[in-house]
Image (cartoon, rainbow, N blue to C red):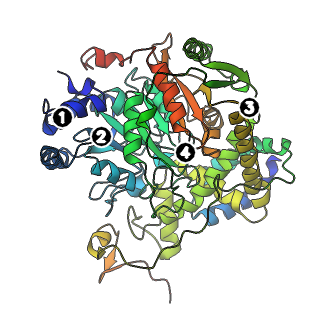
Amino acid sequence: MDLMKLTAVELGKKIKAKEVTVKEAVEAAFARIEKMEGKINSFVTTDKEAALRRAGEVQKLIDDGTLTGPLAGVPVAVKDNMCTSGMLTTCSSKILENFVPTYTAEAVLNLERAGAVVLGKTNMDEFAMGSTTETSAYGVTRNPWNTEHVPGGSSGGSCTAVAAEECSFALGSDTGGSIRQPSSFCGVTGIKPTYGTVSRYGLIAYGSSLDQIGPIAKDVTDCAAILEAIASYDPKDSTSVKRDSYDFTSALTDDVKGMRIGIPKDYFTDGLDSEVKDAIMKAAEELKKKGAIVEEFDLSLVEYAIPAYYIIASAEASSNLARFDGVKYGYRTSEYEGLHNMYKRTRSEGFGAEVKRRIMLGSFVLSSGYYDAYYIKALKTKALIKQAFDKAFERFDVILAPAAPTTAPKLGESLSDPIKMYLGDIYTISVNLAGLPGITVPCGVDSKGLPIGMQLLGDCFQEKKIIRAAYSFEQTRSYVRCPICEEGGSLDE
Amino acid sequence: MAERITDETIEYVGILAKLELSDEEKEQAKKDMTNMLNYIDKLNELDTDGVEPMSHVFPVNNVFREDVVTNGDERERILANAPAKKDGSFKVPKTVE
């Protein structure tokens, strides 16, 4: 039996039924990691010894009846911007090349409480700034569907680890689409929850008003179960929201009868690849066949989301990344004259080009004389975008949209033109500005053999609606494994 | 509009950002920032008069708690990450003459 082929919930059931031990599951994951890493590089760090030790502890807790949840004993990969006590956490940056946190992020802690076993930390765009996982200081991650292509980003390593079956599921973070876009490019499922649902405590901040942690897995059932495990009210995160309910799995029903689904006409413009468009429209037909009421509408303001996002995210990044100064942790330059010179050199040598670009832009838009013209203007735009979504959700339960305008581009094609790369985030970014939940589910494969994903967006706190719609759609289509997984994982050419 | 990013602006932003850029990086930064600001200027098409700036989607208030220590002494573990330390403290270059 290939344990890594199973979904997280399927594997959890087998562990619970004593058909599989936790140790066997963890060993299967590492066997797979050893086979795949040379070609795709999903991980910055793995710790087999710690995982096996933890496997033993978890097995005892399962055996004595302490752990009974669906994720007990299941191997997980965690994006390298979540702090893990005693395990290197780099944010894929040189400036944190040697940072070993003294505490664990609340979301990861919640998973550990549920009995999941952390395998290691996944590669990402440096400080989550990027859409390709090419800006990592620890090498690019490749798309397992075709290693000439990017996996998307910034949670690229988490998505490839799931797609290439190196873990049973993964955690990612999403500031402007960083879970949903790479999920689309890698043919997996990922949720960006409503802002405030999952604690950001221990998540190394990029754009604090936009960042959310979420699950990445093979199917909607896994994502709902994982979200249920990681979501919590946390007094340590001042923007954590006390929700009425943390139940998401009860929404796993194949029923969209009467559900009102809106398709934003203004998302289907020139920039959208025709094969992606066709796949989304076909998905809409499937949902219609199941009894959903599908209608087109004008969302409006679509083209203003990206400029507003880059002002807000860069502004917050310039402030959040001020803490990396070579004093308390991480990299420090070797030669300097005095304190300020030490700060400057440390940061200049420690940060990569994209991070510096955003810190510079952020410092500029917050500087005296430009603050109103840029930063306040962006916050006003954000208010208008939120209003546009509020209006849409008066009419619709769920919005159906592409996750990205194209399938995964080739490696090396994106970074030379930042604005063009930013435009690729057009369908994901406004969701973060408005704080909404969104899910990406695979809905097709293009003529190049690359997966296509669709997004279902809900109003704030309406995760259950998007989970129900996604689950219903998923029943019309079986999970497509990436070709190298079908070939038994042989990557030899 | 592109003229507004001058060498002086890049110098000034470099000070704010605590970044020391090489001449080549400065030229690139000037180009990148000009392009980005030209693109961002699209927002000026939008009439936002009378719109309240939204910093958070949900009404957020200050979150208060009792000032009670809940974690233990982690000095050694924390200092283990320090690039330089001395006598149980972070060591930095001399700041006061």
Could you say which is closer to the camera, residue A47 or residue B50?
B50
Disc 3 target residue: A299
Q: CA distance from mark 1 to mark 2?
A: 15 Å
Task: Estimate the x, y position of residue A318 in percent, counting from the top left.
Answer: 59, 58
> In screen coordinates, is A250 left or right of A303?
left
Residue type at tag 2: Val
Mark 4 in CB contact with mark 3 (< 8 angstroms): no
**If you read the primary sequence from the N terminus, does the residue marked by circle 2 or circle 3 appear first?**
2
Q: Quadrant of residue A285?
A: top right
On screen, residue B95 above or below A238: below
Q: Which mark is residue A15?
A: 1
Q: Secondary structure at mark 3?
A: loop
**If you read the primary sequence from the N terminus, does the residue marked by circle 1 or circle 3 appear first?**
1
On screen, residue A82 above or below A12: below
Pointer 1 chain: A
Mark 4 in CB contact with mark 1 (< 8 angstroms): no
Q: CA distance from mark 2 to mark 4?
A: 22 Å
Pointer 4 chain: A
Q: CA distance from mark 2 to mark 3?
A: 37 Å
Of discs 2 and 3, which sits in the foreground? 3
Disc 2 target residue: A76
Could you say which is closer to the camera, residue A342 or residue A18?
A18
Query: Do circles 2 and 4 both sit on a common chain?
Result: yes
Residue type at tag 1: Ile
Of discs 2 and 4, which sits in the foreground? 4
For the question of whether residue A328 can be seen, the reply is yes
On screen, residue A174 above or below A482: below
